[in-house]
Amino acid sequence: MCAIEAGKRGRSVVVLERNGRIGEKIRISGGGRCNFTNTGTAPENFLSGNPHFTRSALARYTPGDFIALVKRHGVGYHEKKAGQLFCDRGSRDIISLLETEAREAGVVILTGCEVGDVRRGTSFEVSTSAGDFACQSLVIATGGLSIPNIGATDLGYRLARRFGLQIVETLPALVPFLLAPDELKWTAPLSGISIDAAVSTGKKSFRENILFTHRGLSGPAILQASSYWTPGTPVNLDLSPGTPLAEMFTREKHDHIEIPALLAGVLPKRFARAWCDRFTLAGPGRNYSDRKLAEIAAGLHRWAVVPAGTEGFGKAEVTRGGVDTNDLSSKTMEARKVPGLYAVGEVVDVTGELGGYNFQWAWASGFIAGQYA
């Protein structure tokens, strides 16, 4: 995006791509369908040391701007959930769109190009496996540490540090949780079960599905919460949001319904059985006092889990942290103390929530840097 915009201004632009082909993160995103933006994108959808840093870029390059680009190239798309736009055919359409735009803007793309030493004299001097380059502006657009098996490295952070930029601690984000062995004894057999839940950590709460895995918990609500989770703290799960379970249990206990059957009325049967086995709940509901039924309901509305950790960068969709926004101009993405040095996209300390927000940040930050580089 940055290269395209700089090229349109008549700049001589080269993209140094370490992989054998461009857009690997785009290719695998959204299950291959590429959730390329979210029409409801706002600064509130991003986590950053400076919550206002994204405002300028997001206002100057909106989801509507990228949608117009998609339409211009005849790419079919659909809305999967509120605001989340996906390609009809696949992510390759977005990659082709960018390749076409880059070619028309005169951008040179070098694939399989390993970057070595980078120095700064009267210009930036970059040594690579494809030769040496000198440039007036150098843009770090390397992404984060997420999914190393498609080429992610720490190069962007090393370059930023070399030029004196601070790095906010990097952590896996939008990533599944691992559970401790004691918890896994009863949850691992539930692998594959999905439940609509409200998941809370700190002051953030997300209402979407959770998914039991053989290693812990995943699903959209868990991935969302992981970006805000602090290791060692609990994550609270409401497994039946919007349904007053205590009232329902009290009302239905007089019908001689077994407790597992009561739970199976609102939750997957296999989960209901496992939950009852875990807490030794059996027999008809009428055998339980209203107070005990309220306790059972409260446990389902507020299941507190302390994750043993996350599945790490190998499974994380994005990286939290990165180049400190205090060292960058929010209007140009240029380093405040290093003229000509820019950082855009995921390498910056800006992390979007799940649902197309991280792509929109990539398009917007790349666009504005391309107006100045």
Image (cartoon, rainbow, N blue to C red):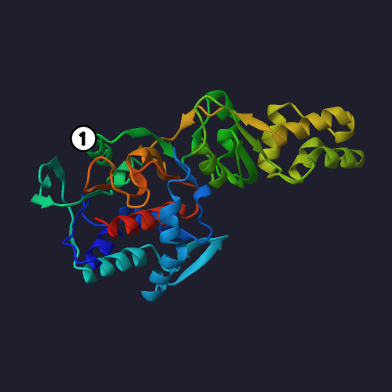
Closer to us: 340 or 19: 340
Q: Residue furthest right?
A: 254
User: Looking at the image, can residue 288 be seen?
Assistant: no
Q: How many numbered marks does the figure carry?
A: 1
User: Looking at the image, can residue 49 be seen?
Assistant: yes
- Residue at the image point whose x is 54% and y is 58% from the top: 40
Image location of residue 102, percent across then percent down: 24, 66
- Quarter of the picture containing the C terminus is bottom left
Image location of residue 340, percent across then percent down: 21, 48
Task: Give the residue at mark 1.
Answer: 162
Amino acid carrying mark 1 in the image: Arg
Q: Residue furthest left?
A: 131
Left or right of 189: which side holds 11?
Answer: left
Closer to us: 343 or 244: 343
Circle 1 Cα neighbour tier, 10 Å, few/some/many (<14 / 14–19 / ≥20): few
Image location of residue 134, percent across then percent down: 10, 51
- Residue at the image point whose x is 75% and y is 32% from the top: 298
Quadrant in which residue 324 is drawn = top left
Image location of residue 299, percent across then percent down: 72, 31
Closer to us: 181 or 143: 143
Left or right of 245: which side holds 278?
Answer: left
- Quarter of the picture containing the N terminus is bottom left
Question: Is label 1 in a helix, a strand or a loop?
Answer: helix
Vertical order, 59 against 345 (above or below) = below
